Amino acid sequence: MSRVASARILVIDDEEFVRNVLTAILTEQGHQVIKVASAEEALPLVESHEFDLVFTDLAMPKINGIAAATQIKERRPEIKVVLMSGYGAETASEGVGKGVIDGAISKPFDLAEINQAIEKVLGAES
């Protein structure tokens, strides 16, 4: 169980299965989650909703995860972004150096990895 209090989280992934599984895990942990299939769907939500954290897939059609994170940070720099990649954490962590990615997890992910990413970027409450 995550030690972070309930967070408002946006999940962006073009794969419905991944989107649904991650949303179910996060919701079960008490987070408020909105899920979308693309960055194009996500960006208007970023402007109209308050989010603490965004999980975004790296490889998506049209706008990839790093480009999505860049646009999210331009609009709302306080939102933390965790990049998910099926290409391994090394690929995902490349975006961390660009300053638009706050954390990275590799797919397939597990519960511990998700919780570690949330705690890393949002900080554990003591």
Image (spheres, grey):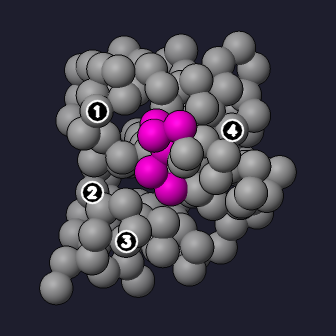
Establish if 107 lies above or below 99: below
- Can you give x and y, in whole percent of width and height, for residue 91 in the image? 75, 49
| Residue 5 percent coordinates (x, y) | 22, 70
Question: Is residue 17 visible in this depiction of the protein?
Answer: yes
Amino acid type indicated by mark 1: Pro
Helix, strand or loop for disc 1: loop
| Distance between the alpha carbons at the discs numbered 2 and 3 | 11 Å
Point out the frontmost of discs 1 and 4.
1
Q: Earlier in the sequence, mark 1 or mark 4?
A: 4
Between tags 1 and 3, which lies in front?
1
Kind of residue at badge 2: Ala
Neighbours of disc 3 within 10 Å: few (<14), some (14-19), many (20+): some
Q: Is residue 126 left or right of residue 92?
A: left
Give the residue type at disc 3. Glu
> Circle 4 is placed at which residue position?
58
Q: Which residue is found at the position 48% from the left and 66% from the top?
A: 117
> For mark 1, what is the residue?
77
Q: Amino acid at mark 4?
A: Leu
